[in-house]
Image (cartoon, rainbow, N blue to C red):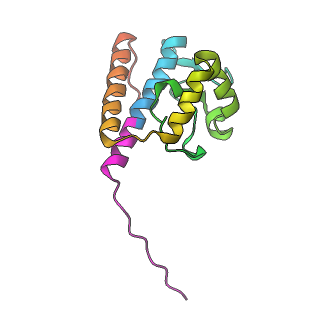
Amino acid sequence: MAWKRRKKKRSPSEHQKAKKLTDKWCSRYVRIKAAVAFDPINMLGRCYTCGRIVDVIHKGDSGHFKSRGSGGSSGLYFDERAIRLQCKPCNGFEGGRPAEYRKALVNEYGEEVVQELEIKHRVNIYTLRDIIGLGLYFRDRVQEMCETYNIYPWW
């Protein structure tokens, strides 16, 4: 019987911890922003790719134009222009529906901006300072929207 070496469990770096926290605030921001635009009383939003109306708290995700697994340096991960509410089927089971997502972005911003986002995805890298600053930005926006629209924090 061959002995397996146990991999030493690494503790998350400061960068990973900050990214995880910023991701939580960013996701909340995207979902609340979608509800505010559609139906803040019932916390409903419209899926960016299929148009389905979803409960943003339980059935909504913050979908990204370029997912983590699509190559590149995740340079769009916290760019507001590239993150929208998606229903769980579109975001999770259908891989984010990239063709529909791109088409909707082109309709919203134009081809030039979408090409800029595609380049940014490949070349931009967030520093620890960037991530912490973005986390504070998203947290402040979430708190502001919750107060303005009387939204009870569900987290």
Residue at 38% x, 42% y is 19
Where residue 67 sits: x, y (%)? 57, 40
Q: Position of residue 23 (x, y in %)?
A: 42, 36
- The quadrant holding residue 133 is top left
User: To which quarter of the image does residue 59 belong?
Assistant: top right
Question: How many marks overall?
Answer: 0
Q: Is residue 13 visible?
A: yes
Residue 3 in magenta? Answer: yes
Q: Is residue 37 left or right of residue 19?
A: right
Against 89, residue 114 (above or below) is above
Q: Is residue 53 above or below residue 118?
A: above
Visible in this render: residue 39? Answer: no
At 63% from the left edge and 21% from the top edge, which residue is drawn? 106
Nearer-the-camera pick, 14 or 102:
102
Q: Is residue 31 magenta?
A: no
Q: If the image is split into quadrants, where does the N terminus sit?
A: bottom right
Q: Residue furthest bottom?
A: 1
Residue at the image point whose x is 57% and y is 36% from the top:
66
Write the start and end of the magenta stretch as one range: 1-22
**Residue drawn at 33 percent across, 14 percent down:** 147
Whole-percent x, y for residue 136 in the image: 30, 29
- Quarter holding the C terminus is top left
- Front residue (pair 134, 111): 111
Q: Nearer the viewer, residue 38 or 67?
A: 67
In the image, residue 49 sits, relative to residue 7, either above or below, namely: above
Left or right: 54 with respect to 8? right
